[in-house]
Image (cartoon, coloured by chain):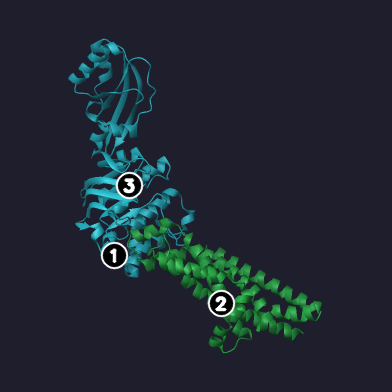
Chain colours: A green, B cyan
């Protein structure tokens, strides 16, 4: 039992860590493009911004479980299989990327436009402004949003687990719910609660350090 | 240094700036005053290309600003520092890093840049705060850091956008003194946008008054304030209650005649009485000028005016409500 719990914990951490990482990278890149092309951005481009915004909204409106099934061919193409923890990283990443993009965009939009203007006034380039000023100033808020994303993905991973991804959510359903092993269910849930607390505390701690 | 001819700017159909022409020469402290929404901050931003313009010509150090390619505009901005009402410092950098930032942007070697930052912090008197977080500074200290940052690249022109509007009167004066110092000792030409008349009087040698995007008065500061036109008077309205009878006359006392006991002499020579309604002493750059508002009975008015003219006084009859 303990072995199974440990293995499920490993699978969960594996899925959450990697999907947070990948969605962080892609979502961040997307957010940078959106912030540059937005109406008050440094390189306004209404067509590009509207297109990106539409895709982001579209992906976010899919129920996760439907999205996961819909992109099975893509998942197969990337990892060679559609079952297992590794395979579930694909839909998790795709589901979380637009979410990350919106959160990071929000964080960047909150940066005082005056600070950006000051940087322009002494001749900073657009890239220097985006990375040297906006991202830097927004970092505390981005970190907090990172915790939100990771916790969200923890929840999604339980769903992914139920359709073959493994992990704690899967364990709780398979053993705890279907086989009436209440203790397994309780353990799984308690571990999930602890992970959430841990992620949030880590996020808060980093925020306090860098704000 | 700066030559503007027929500048106009529109937001959609709204005219923000109309037919602005002005000249700022090397070493000037040039004031742009007006109510909020008069277009003065927009005008200031046309100088360093933060705002575009649709008509006319803005020539800064020989370059037509709107014709500059992005690289040329960057070079121009290097020559023009700017400070802001809300300081616009980066919260996640400390004092030293904030002043360092423009130097990093321009790739100044680290050692040289660090030495320059030390120099600037000494200039604004905040050397001991260099490790401090921005949020732990007072408003005046933040503006000093803003000034240090704006001067980091040794600009020839410093643009000040309501730089003292968020500060209390005492701090305002200390910041203005610093700006004067920079103007005189470093020879930096300064353009000041403000709605505070005291700021203009204290540091500007030339001034334009902007109202609804148009210049309504312009000239040398002392002359302009000694004989304010209709438009300027609206802005500098003296808030003295008008006495129901008689006429109020505003007398101006430049330094030369301040010692000649004008008032008592006039009373004696004309054998008349009048009351003092109000007065104040104002500082214009390096000069001190006194104002006195007296109230004379209407039947004495002509004699009083005759006497004032004869004695070479600077005066004006005030209308109701002024």
Distance of label 2 from label 1 (alpha carbons): 38 Å
Q: Residues within 10 Å of mark 1 (few under 14, many from 20)?
A: few
Q: Is residue A72 above or below residue B263?
A: below
The reply, left or right, for residue B223 in relation to residue A16 is left
* Residue A99, image quadrant: bottom right
Respond whether the residues carrying marks 2 and 1 are from the same subunit.
no
Instruction: First in sequence, mark 3 or 1: give its number.
Output: 3
Q: Position of residue B200 (x, y in %)?
A: 31, 40
Respond whether the residues carrying marks 3 and 1 are from the same subunit.
yes
Label 3, on which residue?
A: B16
The answer to whether the residue labelled 3 contacts the one labelled 1, judged by CB atoms less than 8 Å apart, is: no
The local secondary structure at tag 2 comes to helix
Seen from the viewer's position, the closer of residues B280 and A184 is: A184
Q: Is residue B96 above or below residue B283?
A: below
Q: Which disc is residue B70 wearing?
A: 1
Residue shown at 37%/21% (left/top)?
B242
Residue shown at 34%/38% (left/top)?
B198
Label 2, on which residue?
A: A93
Seen from the viewer's position, the closer of residues B316 and A42 is: A42
- Chain letter belonging to callout 1: B
Distance of label 3 from label 1 (alpha carbons): 24 Å
């Amino acid at each position: 039992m303990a072995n199974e719990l440990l293995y499920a914990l490993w699978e969960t951490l594996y899925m959450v860590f990697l999907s947070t990482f990948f969605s962080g990278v892609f979502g961040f890149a997307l957010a940078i493009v959106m912030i540059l092309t937005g109406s008050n951005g440094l390189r306004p481009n209404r067509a590009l911004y509207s297109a990106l915004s539409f895709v982001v909204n579209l992906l976010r409106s899919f129920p996760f479980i439907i999205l996961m099934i819909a992109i099975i061919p893509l998942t197969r193409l990337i990892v060679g299989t559609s079952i297992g923890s590794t395979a579930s990283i694909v839909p998790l990443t795709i589901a979380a990327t637009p979410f990350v993009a919106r959160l990071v965009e929000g964080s960047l939009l909150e940066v005082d436009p005056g600070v950006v203007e000051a940087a322009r006034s002494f001749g900073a380039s657009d890239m220097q402004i985006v990375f040297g000023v906006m991202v830097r100033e927004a970092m505390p808020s981005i970190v907090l949003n990172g915790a939100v994303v990771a916790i969200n993905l923890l929840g999604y991973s339980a769903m992914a687990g139920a359709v073959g991804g493994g992990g704690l959510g899967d364990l709780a359903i398979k053993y705890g719910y279907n086989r009436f092993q209440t203790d397994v269910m309780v353990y799984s849930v308690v571990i999930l609660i602890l992970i959430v607390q841990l992620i949030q505390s880590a996020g808060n701690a980093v925020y306090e350090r860098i704000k | 240094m700066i030559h503007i001819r027929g500048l106009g700017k529109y937001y959609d159909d709204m005219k923000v700036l109309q037919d602005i022409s002005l000249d700022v020469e090397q070493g000037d402290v040039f004031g742009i005053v007006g109510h909020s929404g008069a277009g003065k901050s927009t005008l200031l931003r046309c100088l360093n290309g933060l705002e575009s313009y649709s008509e006319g010509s803005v020539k800064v150090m020989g370059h037509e600003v709107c014709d500059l390619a992005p690289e040329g505009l960057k070079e121009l901005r290097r020559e023009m520092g700017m400070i802001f009402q809300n300081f616009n410092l980066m919260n996640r950098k400390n004092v030293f890093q904030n002043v360092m930032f423009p130097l990093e942007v321009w790739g100044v070697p680290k050692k040289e840049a660090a030495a320059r930052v030390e120099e600037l912090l000494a200039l604004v008197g905040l050397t001991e705060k260099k490790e401090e977080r921005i949020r732990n500074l007072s408003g005046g200290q933040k503006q000093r850091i803003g000034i240090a940052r704006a001067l980091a690249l040794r600009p020839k022109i410093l643009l000040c956008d309501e730089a003292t509007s968020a500060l209390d009167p005492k701090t305002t004066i200390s910041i203005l003194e610093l700006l004067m110092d920079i103007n005189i000792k470093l020879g930096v030409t300064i353009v000041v946008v403000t709605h505070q008349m005291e700021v203009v009087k204290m540091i500007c040698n030339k001034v334009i008054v902007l109202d609804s995007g148009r210049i309504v008065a312009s000239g040398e500061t002392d002359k302009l304030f000694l004989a304010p036109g209709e438009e300027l008077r609206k802005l500098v309205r003296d808030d003295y209650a008008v006495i129901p009878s008689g006429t109020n006359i505003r007398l101006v006392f430049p330094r030369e005649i301040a010692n000649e006991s004008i008032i008592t002499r006039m009373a004696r020579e004309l054998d008349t009485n009048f009351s003092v309604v109000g007065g104040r002493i104002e500082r214009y750059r390096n000069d001190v000028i006194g104002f006195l508002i007296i109230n004379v009975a209407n039947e004495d008015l002509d004699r009083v005016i005759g006497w004032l003219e004869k004695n070479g006084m600077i005066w004006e009859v005030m209308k109701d409500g002024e």
